[in-house]
Image: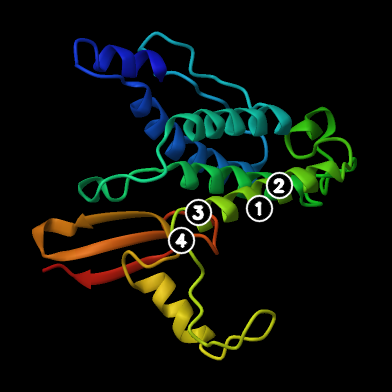
Amino acid sequence: MEREIQAFTQGLAGPVHWLLCVVNGPGAGTGMGMFYRYGGVPIVAKSFLPNDDMNIPRASLQETLDYILALCDEAIAGLPDTWSAQYYGRFTKGAAMAIKARTLQFAARPLFNTGAPYLDFGENNKMISFGSQDNTRWDKAIAANEAVLSWAQANGYALINTGGAGTGKPNPNALNDYGTATSVPGNSEVLLACKVDENMSNICVYVFFGIDDFFETLFQWSAFLVCF
């Protein structure tokens, strides 16, 4: 992918590293979605030419995890904390951090974090199990999630809590606050949002990724609002 981006931007003014990072962010998100559903998957790190061998074997669970985390780390290192209003919806450092955190959560769960996989896959057990139970995987997931929350607080993001009940107490407005978080564009929980005008109809589809859902899937939260 880096080769293709460099070729595309050849001769253009200014650095192009941020463009690679913007591409790596969604790539990591897609990889995470396949990782938690299927385990190890084929790793494709380039564009295919017509004569290329496209029979890419499934990688191991560890190899798939390492590849996703590498994409996340490169995106985190190169992306800004915020974009100007005209670029609203682009990947930020925090969005890439959230993908990394959620990926590590999936890696730490007992389904993968075990010496005996849920289904005996014979010599291919490494595609659905790490082959060992290691509690440090949880430590890595906790540290990554805490890093996202710290970043979010430092950059103006916050969980919506209008109930005023205080720390450690149930929020009496939880249902309404959840509706705001998943339906109102630009609210304080949105880390990543895409907006499109479908078929020139003045109906915009907003797709949210908030700090309380950590990329379950980018397309799970959708709200249809009239664009003015």
In the image shown, does 11 or 200 lie closer to the viewer? 11
Q: Which label sits on residue 157?
A: 4
- Kindly identify which residue carries mark 1: 146
Query: Mark 1: few, some, or many residues within 10 Å (few <14, many ≥20)?
Result: some
Reading the chain from its start, which is encountered first: label 4 or label 2?
A: 2
Query: What's under tag 1, amino acid-wise?
Result: Glu
- Kindly identify which residue carries mark 2: 143
Residue at 51 percent of width and 28 percent of height: 74
Q: Is residue 39 visible?
A: yes
In this rendering, position of residue 62 left or right of residue 218? right
Closer to viewer: mark 4 or mark 3: 3
State the image quarter where residue 23 is shown: top left
Closer to viewer: mark 3 or mark 2: 3
Q: Residue furthest front?
A: 154
Query: Mark 3: few, some, or many residues within 10 Å (few <14, many ≥20)?
Result: few
- Kindly identify which residue carries mark 3: 154
Determine whether 157 is above or below 89 in the image. Answer: below
Q: Are marks 1 and 2 in contact (CB under 8 Å)?
A: yes
Q: Are marks 3 and 2 in contact (CB under 8 Å)?
A: no
